[in-house]
Image (cartoon, rainbow, N blue to C red):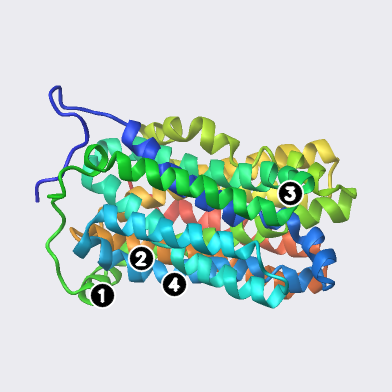
Amino acid sequence: MTELRVGDRDTGKTNMLPVYIISLATFIIFFQGFMVAPLLPMLSDHFHTSVRHVSFIEPAYLLGYGVFTLVYAPMSEKYGRFKIIALSMLLFIVLTAGTAAVNNIDHMIALRLLTGMGAAGVAPTTISWISDTHPYEQRGHALGIFFGCMAGGAAFGSSIGAVLSSLVGWRYLFIGVSAVGFAILITIIKLKIWLFGNQRMIVAERRNVLSSFREILSKARAKRTYAYVLLNGMFHSGIFAWLGYYLHLNYGLSEMQIGLALLGYGIPGLMLGPSLGKLADRYGRNKIIPIGILISAIAVLVLSQVPSLIASCLLVTFLSFGFDLSHPLFAAIVTTFSANKGAATGLFAFFLFLGYGLGSLVLSLIVSVGLNTAFQYYGICALIGSIISFFIFRDER
């Protein structure tokens, strides 16, 4: 299969600017996805219900997102990357704006589910586009940019989103995010030919997608990797979904203060994502992935002991750093599982967001033991997972 290359076609150099532009769509989707976590106390008061009830808006969105990545994966192979990204962004824009009009927490949970289902096509299709346009030896760099934008969206969603909601209210926050999403969609449409070529993008041989899924999952290497994508997603999502309430419970912070305290989450990926991707390309994923999981595990175990507020803010940054040392590297590995990259990356997104949804759901269900104790349970599981990963990924490069 001949792969499409973007950028400077005369010199053969790979231009990373298109990666940044297309990744803006993922940035705003993750901004919206993670801006609600710090708002749990505010929404609980607004809808006159418990924080635990409100917390289900997060797993509803993430589970809807995770399941529907499998729907968009074969569609991007059949209809092209541009059409799926544009369709998914349009659904995201409309449903995000509609969330601003809800007057009932159950309606918000339902609409968050639909928004996740609508937005689910952007991330896996972008990963497929990166695998179409970048050789494996440069893919770590490109995926580092993509996951940096993802982490940046989570960071600014949880921090700037919380600050803005305290100033203008949560309804106008959703409307503003929808407007920014619309601007990004218009930009991608305007630059369609430059970003995606002249609509003759060469894709993998079109095969029955279920057959592709079965073929990929029949491989032991794929099963191990996807299992870690699921479990690592559960760990990070469960912790992050409750970080805002953790800061409110243990330090009495307001929504604006919570936003400022969470500012460090995602900063490592936003600032260092491309460099971390190059680091993995050079030294091997077998070394970097276990270290990333270990860093996150230690950060959460220390958080469970309720250190000083300054220490907690620093630990939030280390938690994010651990994510940036693991998930982008998983994404690069899965692109080697099959010539049908849409199926491989669709499964990656499915297990990632299924993990995100299950992680926040499980923590919501066990939080009755105490939030700090629940954090400790998650940290212990991640610590065990990091030790095992040294053996699981020892042959990866």
Secondary structure under badge 2? helix
Q: Position of residue 197 (x, y in %)?
A: 18, 42
The residue wearing badge 1 is 214
Amino acid identity at mark 4: Val
Q: Position of residue 308 (x, y in %)?
A: 86, 40
How far apart, in angstroms, are the residues tagged by discs 1 and 2? 11 Å
Amino acid identity at mark 3: Ser
- Of pointers 4 and 1, the one earlier in the residue sequence: 4
- Of tags 3 and 2, which is closer to the observer? 3
> At x 68% / y 77%, what residue is drawn?
106
Total marks drawn? Answer: 4
- Of residue 87 and residue 308, the one placed in the foreground of this image is 87
| Location of residue 346 with respect to 332 vertically, above or below | below
The residue wearing badge 3 is 165
How far apart, in angstroms, are the residues tagged by discs 1 and 3? 45 Å
How far apart, in angstroms, are the residues tagged by discs 3 and 2? 34 Å
Secondary structure under badge 3? helix
The residue wearing badge 4 is 67
The residue wearing badge 2 is 347
Position of the C terminus by quadrant: top left
